[in-house]
Amino acid sequence: MLIPFIDLAFLFFFSLTTIFVLRKTARTVGLVDKPNERKLHTGAVPLVGGISICISLLYFLFNNPNIIPHAPLYGACIIVLVTVGALDDKFDISFKIRFAVQALLSVAMMVLGDIELATIGDMVGTGEIITLGWFGYIVTILAVIGAINAFNMVDGIDGLLGGLSIVTFGGLGIMLAYDGQSNIAYLCLVMIVIMLPYIMLNLGLFGRRRKVFMGDAGSMLIGFTVIWFLLLSSQNGTNPPLRPVTALWLIAIPLMDMAAIMIRRVRRGDSPFKPDREHLHHIFQRIGFSSTNTLLAICGLASTFAAIGILSEIYAVSEYIMFYLFLGCFAIYSYLLANLGKSTLKK
């Protein structure tokens, strides 16, 4: 037990050191986030959280290349994503370019890594496992783009992206450890440890002037890693450690928030990608919640959803029951979000 603890402690300080070094570089090259009508923070904040996590993760994978299948491919993909994300943070590139890169990386994941959404289990209750065939390629591309942008959209207040990421990686790690998949479970723990220095600086625990943001580079890295791990865990044979429907519960808040917001935008005639201040964390703050209470409330809700998914997996609750229950929760979430959004905007 001592060696893993030492390794994790080293990774924590490696990530912490990396992020402090990158802060100075970011200010030099202008990779900072400045306040505007949607960004209400104070001063120019370095956008280096994602780059630091990427470097730390690549260091770990370089020294543990066999911890997951196709680790070099995964490493190459996150390098591309983080590079594109950093360019977006600096120059604000078109979302079409970002989507194209994400789609190409999902194709590489399927063709070179043989990781795709080939089955969704018995989600509709027919008693038969539903396989997607060639349609699985399209669904996988949509799943990758959806997961990346779901985590990107929740990055709206300090600590929220990091907190929701910990819920997802923690829940997945628990499931994999329960199933005896120790390698990927350990990698989930590594992800959490590597993210902790960013979360601490993002929350201002080292002082407000040392604050950092994740940036699009980081949110894209997190979303892509989540979907890679979920597909790897739910599509690896006839009896995978994670049923596809359980994956929905592990990313429930980012997924529900993205879907609900995009539906609302389309209904009122706006682009689904047009930014606004109608996400769950914005509504909580307009109601009167502080940033800290908003963070705790949303992470608590995400943890509840994740716990429901984990328990349903452990006690083998039927997939179709969990799927329809998820749809019911999404319907309630969308209704409450829409009505709270309207009422708070009127105030």
Image (tube, rainbow, N blue to C red):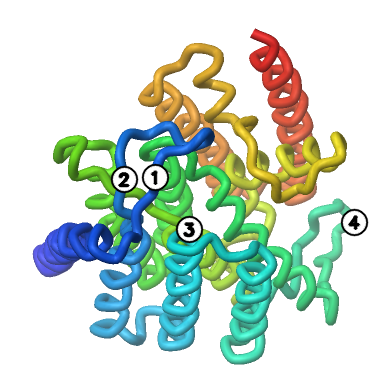
Q: Secondary structure at mark 4?
A: loop
State the CA–CA distance, disc 4 to disc 2. Answer: 55 Å
From the image, tell me which residue sits under label 1: 34
From the image, tell me which residue sits under label 4: 126
From the image, tell me which residue sits under label 2: 44
Q: Nearer the viewer, residue 99 or 34?
A: 34
Q: Secondary structure at mark 2?
A: loop
The mark closer to the camera, 4 or 2, is: 2
Q: Confirm whether residue 12 shows in the render.
A: no
From the image, tell me which residue sits under label 3: 216
State the CA–CA distance, disc 2 to disc 3. Answer: 16 Å
Badge 1 vs badge 2, beta-carbon distance below 8 Å: yes
Relative image position of residue 342 (x, y in whole percent): 73, 18
User: Against 268, is 117 above or below?
Assistant: below
The mark closer to the camera, 1 or 4, is: 1
Badge 4 vs badge 2, beta-carbon distance below 8 Å: no
